[in-house]
Image (cartoon, helix red, strand yellow):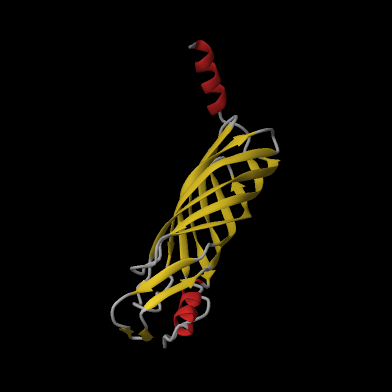
Amino acid sequence: MSAAIMFTTAAFAQDATPRWEVYGNYSFMQFNPTLSGLQSRSFNGGGGGFQANFGKLFGFKGDFQGYGSTQTSFTVTGRPTVTPHGTIPTGTFNSDGNMFTYLFGPVVGVHAHRIHFYGEYLLGGSASNLYGNLVRSIDAGGGTLSGGGSQHPFTQALGGGFDLKVNNHVALRLAEMDWILTRYTNPITDTNNQHSFRYQGGIVFMFGAQ
């Protein structure tokens, strides 16, 4: 019991805060399209970013991630569907898509002796051809939809995570988990505001102790 108490105290003791952090990571996103009949998609990808720390608690972060997706299907049964942007014939339409996010914002955290806990709120944008590829697939099957191409909507992330410090210059990002809001406009029903989940894990390089 004494050893456990000593280890916990050492792990959570305040430690020197690096002035700069640069990281690379794997990233998983469970993306939820706002279109009935189009299932949730698992995006796998990765990226990196930087963080500038100001004092012991506050920092500013820039985060850049890229994702790809596997092929999925959208099915219309019965009669063709008429939308404000054209007609969707009956049938099954296959599409895939990718996404890139670029987010910036404040980070609040504590650099303990071995563990760095933090929370973040990031704002920015993203780009995806997800809905554009679906429109092209529908039109290739006899549809008359408009609205193909990539979209670049407002995007935000709210969450946090923790890193395990290896030495004074390297840490392992064990888990960062965020709620992601994207505002891609569905070209079929004009709905937006997708609520998704994101996980990241990777390696962090630290420079310039404060």
**Could you say which quadrant of the image residue 145 lies in?**
bottom left
Give the residue drawn at x 41%, y 85%: 143
Q: Height in image: 162 above or below 43?
A: above
Residue 163 placement (x, y as % from top left): 57, 39
Give the side of residue 167 with respect to residue 143, left or right: right
Residue 67 appears anywhere in the view: yes
On the question of residue 119 being in view, the answer is no
Q: In the image, is residue 4 above or below residue 172?
A: above
Indicate the position of residue 182 as horizontal and vertical percent values. 44, 65
Residue 137 at what x, y percent from top left? 48, 78
Q: Residue at x 50, y 11 (%)?
A: 2
In the depicted structure, whether residue 174 falls above or below residue 93: above
Residue 54 vertical position relative to residue 87 in the rendered view, above or below: above
Q: Residue furthest top?
A: 2
Residue at figure coordinates x 54%, y 59% from the top left: 104
Picture quarter containing residue 64? Answer: bottom right
Task: Looking at the picture, tell me which residue is in the foreground, 51 or 183.
Answer: 183
At horizontal 44% and vertical 68% (from top left) the residue drawn is 73
Rendered location of residue 28, percent (x, y): 52, 53
Q: Work out which quarter of the rendered image holds the C terminus and state it.
A: top right
Number of numbered discs present? 0
